[in-house]
Amino acid sequence: MGIYQVRVEENKDFDFIQTLIQFAFADAEYSDHQEHFLVQKLRTDTAFLPNLALVACDEQGNIVGHIMFSEAIVDKTKVLALAPLSIAPTNQNQGIGTTLINVAHEQIKKLDYPCVVVLGHPNYYAKFGCESAEKFGIQAPFEVPEGALRVLLLTNDIPKGVIEYARAFF
Ligand SMILES: CC(C)(COP(=O)(O)OP(=O)(O)OC[C@H]1O[C@@H](n2cnc3c(N)ncnc32)[C@H](O)[C@@H]1OP(=O)(O)O)[C@@H](O)C(=O)NCCC(=O)NCCS
């Protein structure tokens, strides 16, 4: 597939994004299959970061991937939480997820957060320099598969403790 455009999501995209997310997670192993509702809830949450809600488009302008971030708290410090990341099933394994993470990372580096936390497959996120959160004393507020909670360091001074996710996650 050709070059993708990555842009901030717009209101007119919301219905399409919701369907894309539902399909993307339909066969995902560690999923409650509620991610498409989570995205809707997050958009109304004060922790939501609209400028980091990005879509990847194919050459025809069709949306083929989506990424979203929200603020979370660790030990009274604001950090970023990446969730969810969704690529349309027929477009997976073509580098779109990688592109979305890299574009978002460029934006995030300009902001003032110590780290990004993400729940996902360790091998996938390790490619982006994400390390085991356990190693840094960061824990999820719920049970997660071993090694699934990762952290991307943006500074050397990161907080320790249990992540307080945005209300939309509960
Ligand atoms: C996981 C996901 C975001 C990856 O995005 P993608 O655009 O398909 O992946 P990329 O093309 O950027 O990267 C491909 C690499 O990731 C690996 N990969 C793809 N999906 C993976 C998964 N679910 N778990 C682990 N590794 C995965 C591929 O094996 C490939 O590895 P390689 O580079 O060593 O060959 C996408 O497949 C997806 O939306 N899956 C369903 C929803 C989901 O699980 N989201 C993640 C929740 S955090």
Image: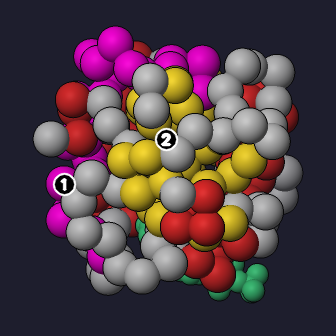
Q: Answer yes or no: disc 2 within 8 Å of ligand 1.
A: no
Q: Amino acid at mark 1?
A: Gln
The one of 48 and 79 positioned closer to us in this rendering? 79
Image location (x, y in percent) of residue 136 = 61, 58
> Helix or strand or loop: what does disc 1 sit on?
loop
The residue that appears at 34% across and 13% down in the rendered structure is 46
Crowding around mark 1 (Cα neighbors within 10 Å: few <14, some 14 to 19, many 20+) is: few
In the rendered image, residue 144 lying in the magenta stretch gets the answer no
Q: Amino acid at mark 2?
A: Ala
The location of residue 24, given as percent across then percent down, is 39, 65
Q: Is mark 1 within 8 Å of ligand 1?
A: no
In this view, which residue lies farthest toward the left? 170
Rendered location of residue 56, percent (x, y): 65, 44
Displayed-image quarter of ligand 1: bottom right
Q: Quadrant of the N terminus?
A: bottom right
| Label of residue 81 in the image | 2
In this rendering, the label closer to the viewer, 1 or 2: 2
Q: Quadrant of the C terminus?
A: top left
Q: Which residues are magenta?
A: 30-52
Quadrant of the rendered image containing residue 74: top left
Let me know if residue 43 appears in the view.
Answer: yes
Q: Residue at x 29, y 18 (%)?
A: 45
- The one of 116 and 9 positioned closer to us in this rendering: 116
Query: Is 51 covered by the magenta stretch?
Result: yes
* Residue occupying image coordinates x 84% and y 51%: 3
**Residue lying at the far top of the rendered structure:** 46
The residue carrying mark 1 is 34
Residue contact between numbered discs 1 and 2, judged by CB atoms under 8 Å: no
Q: Residues within 10 Å of mark 2 (few under 14, many from 20)?
A: many
Residue 75 is tagged as: none
Identify the mark nearer the N-term, 1 or 2.
1
